[in-house]
Image (spheres, rainbow, N blue to C red):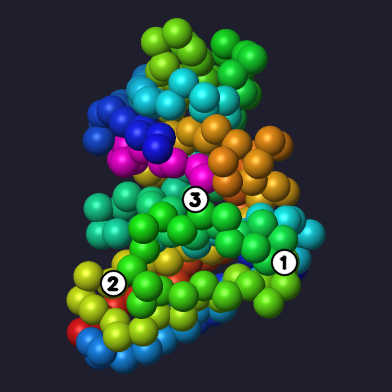
Amino acid sequence: GENVEQHPSTLSVQEGDSAVIKCTYSDSASNYFPWYKQELGKRPQLIIDIRSNVGEKKDQRIAVTLNKTAKHFSLHITETQPEDSAVYFCAASSNDYKLSFGAGTTVTVRA
Amino acid sequence: DTAVSQTPKYLVTQMGNDKSIKCEQNLGHDTMYWYKQDSKKFLKIMFSYNNKELIINETVPNRFSPKSPDKAHLNLHINSLELGDSAVYFCASSISGGANTGELFFGEGSRLTVL
């Protein structure tokens, strides 16, 4: 089955700086790569996703890049703000009714 | 309107007891899931259902028995609760889980504490 590894497990950044989270996946058949944000005590919510026919996608301050050959994808958050503090999860799916999540990255934005 | 709702939000119970968590979605989605989030925040899939049919059982002990009476509902019954079952259980739904897998909409979670 799919195995998704995510790094780093914790990330502390100064407000206004950028944050980068990296993930690798094992199943070359995976073709859908979403990112979820989970605030403390809340449910995970989708913030951005990318499919395997696209190399990069951007939505305001967040962007995701995908390297299919290397089987890794990354989340980039620019101009971080205190409300970006949360746990971020990458995930991968190969159309098999199962979205496999990485272990999560706790992001803390220091004011 | 809550898209994915699950009840109860909190359960505190003794080892050996049986408990159920209910989940309903009003999004018209075909696919529903149960995920377990442990104390380290790891989100692990337990089950996925498509149109009431079990698709994925991710090596979950048979003390856990999901039931989907229709495609809008997916309930989880747990027998003989153990300490290790303490976690937050999230229900989720998506338009479909196969070729057009897309966004998962999660419920608020049900925090189960086994004493």
Label 3 sits on what residue type? Pro
**Range of residues picked out in magenta:** A98-111
- Please tell me whether mark 1 sits on a helix, a strand or a loop: loop
Q: Is residue A49 above or below residue A63?
A: below
Residue at (44%, 41%) from the top-left corner?
A100
Residue at (54%, 20%) from the top-left corner?
A63
- Please tell me whether mark 3 sits on a helix, a strand or a loop: loop
> What is the distance, in whole Å, between disc 3 and disc 2 at their CAs?
20 Å
Quarter-of-image position of residue B89: bottom left
In the foreground, A86 or B111: B111
Chain bearing tag 1 is B
Q: Which mark is residue B71?
A: 1
- Horizontal and vertical percent for residue B53? 65, 63
Q: Which residue does the numbered mark 2 point to in the structure image?
A: B85
Q: Which residue does the numbered mark 3 point to in the structure image?
A: A44
In this view of the protein, can residue A19 be seen by the observer?
A: no
